[in-house]
Image (cartoon, helix red, strand yellow):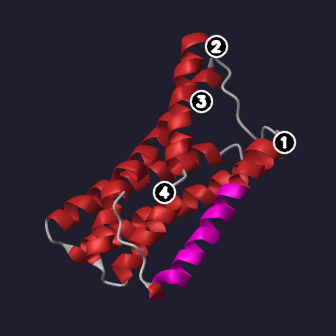
Amino acid sequence: MDVAAPEKNDRPFWIINGVVSVAALSLLAYLLLLRQGHNDATSLAFMPAINASFNGLAAVLLVLGVLAIKQKKQAQHQALMLGAFASSTFFLVGYLAYHYVHGDTKYPGAGGAKLAYLLLLASHVVLSIPVVPLALAAFYYAFQKNFTVHRKITKFLFPIWLYVSVTGVVVFALLRSAYSH
């Protein structure tokens, strides 16, 4: 990614961005890898469906936001992208709350279905890691009216964020289907 080096006055933003991103990733790693959760089937059992809805909404808003800016509808683009960011933020809060209570969710299937699920999940998880810092950077540069850097960042951010949002819905659907059998 060929993003211009941050200017000296951007240093506080990059420090905050790094701290927020590392904190979010660390909390998620703790919840999924170290903390076991209660596995109470009724506590927050509704959250995966809500989280998938937030992911789906984020995907729709992202696509509409890109279409709006291509049509030079800047105010609409801003509103849609803020909506996508809010939806993804609500997803992340709900996801963290659910996994705090339940711990990691294991795929119950076997064979090829499990392998396909795990490969999809791995790509989803790995690609989700840069979304927070890239999204924060895209918003920062948009608010700074530095659209040259904003466009360079969003050129990489958009397809990653969209993929993560869509595959989040697919992961939910695969888990729901596997557990209903």
Decide if residue 43 is in sight here.
no
Q: Reading the chain from its start, which is encountered first: label 2 or label 4?
A: 2
Q: Residues within 10 Å of mark 3 (few under 14, many from 20)?
A: some
Q: Nearer the viewer, residue 3 or 118?
A: 3
Q: Is residue 66 above or below residue 143?
A: above
Are there few (<14), some (14-19), or many (20+) residues within 10 Å of tag 4? Answer: many
User: Three-letter amino acid code at disc 3?
Assistant: Leu
- Write the residue at 46% across / 46% down: 164
Say what amino acid the circle numbered 4 marks: Val
Q: Secondary structure beneath disc 3?
A: helix
* Horizontal side of residue 152 vs 160, given as left or right: left
**Tag 2: amino acid:** Ala
Q: Which residues are magenta?
A: 9-26
Quadrant position of the N terminus in the picture: bottom left
Q: Which residue is mark 2?
A: 110
Q: Which residue is mark 3?
A: 175
- Residue to which mark 1 is pinned: 36
Kindly check if marks 1 and 3 are in contact, taking CB atoms under 8 A apart as contact.
no
Q: Is residue 4 magenta?
A: no
Q: CA distance from mark 4 to mark 3?
A: 23 Å
Q: Earlier in the sequence, mark 4 or mark 3?
A: 4
Name the residue at 51% across, 40% down: 124
- Tag in front: 1 or 4: 4
Element assignment for label 1: loop
Per the model, the C-alpha gap separating discs 2 and 1 is: 23 Å
Q: Name the amino acid, label 1.
A: Gln
Q: Which residue appears at 64% of the width and 48% of the height?
A: 47
> Could you tell which of marks 1 and 3 lies nearer the N-terminus?
1
Determine the CA span between mark 1 and mark 3.
19 Å
In percent of width and height, residue 16 lies at: 59, 77
Q: Residue at x 48, y 50 (%)?
A: 55
Q: Is residue 25 magenta?
A: yes
